[in-house]
Amino acid sequence: MDANMITPFVNAIQNVFSTMFQLPVEIGEPRLKTNRKATHDVSGIIGVSGVMTGTIVLSMPLEAAGSIITLFTGEEFEAESDDFADAVGELVNMISGNAKAEFQRKGVSISCPSVVIGADHTIAVQSGTPCVLIPCSTDCGEVVLEVALREAEAEVSTSAAA
């Protein structure tokens, strides 16, 4: 995966966390993810389509998610509540949207977020798509961005094939 695909996400998480929560983010060394197991208990997932395809996952321990959501909303929510999941979804949406704005090309769309809460869940990515883990440290705890993107395969139009 091209580093130019990762840099917008590093910038986005730092920008969103510092602007929205006044929460500095220290970025660790990115590395390839080698399994499908979620990094932590809470995962906000966004699909990417268009000239790039793949998924963006924001994964964090339940306790860190609770602290960050409290900073975000000003309220505490139980992990089982719809508001908790909505806040996690909005968080990954803001990061993904911020990163999308940095891409120099048009034709990239992001989906509505999905949220999975629970220990030992798995997240499947498209086969052949590398997934880069970007570990982040905050005062609320560890947060990990998982970026699994690739260039979309060129579609052959019916007229070109004829």
Image (cartoon, rainbow, N blue to C red):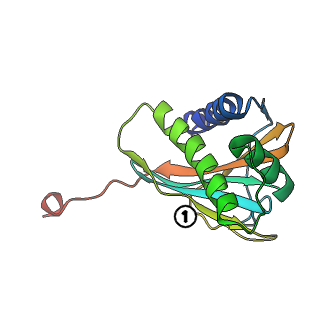
Please name the residue shown 74% across and 64% down the image: 35
Name, please, the residue furthest toward the front.
75
Q: Looking at the picture, tell me which residue is in the foreground, 37 or 121.
A: 121
| Residue at numbered disc 1 | 126
Residue 136, compared with residue 116, is above or below; it is above
Where in the figure is residue 3, as x and y percent of width and height? 60, 35
Local packing at callout 1 (Cα closer than 10 Å; few below 14, some 14-19, many 20+) is few
At which x and y percent is residue 105?
39, 35
Image quadrant occupied by the N terminus? top right
Count up the numbered dots: 1
Disc 1 secondary structure class? loop
Comparing 29 with 101, the one in front is: 101
Q: Nearer the viewer, residue 62 or 29?
A: 62
**Quadrant that contains the C terminus:** bottom left
User: For this view, does 136 lie left or right of residue 51?
Assistant: right
Direction from residue 85 to residue 156 in the image, left or right: left
Percent x, y of residue 41: 79, 63
Image vertical order of residue 119 relative to residue 52, above or below: below
Residue 68: % across, % down: 77, 45
Residue at 75% from the left image edge and 60% from the top image edge? 42
Q: Judge whether residue 33 can be spotted in this image.
A: yes
Residue placed at 63% from the left, 68% from the top?
A: 124
Q: Is residue 1 visible in the rendered structure shown here?
A: no
Kindly identify the residue that appears in the image at 35 percent across and 44 percent down.
107
Looking at the image, residue 100 lies above or below residue 114: above
Quick check: 127 left or right of 140?
left
Q: Amino acid at mark 1?
A: Gln
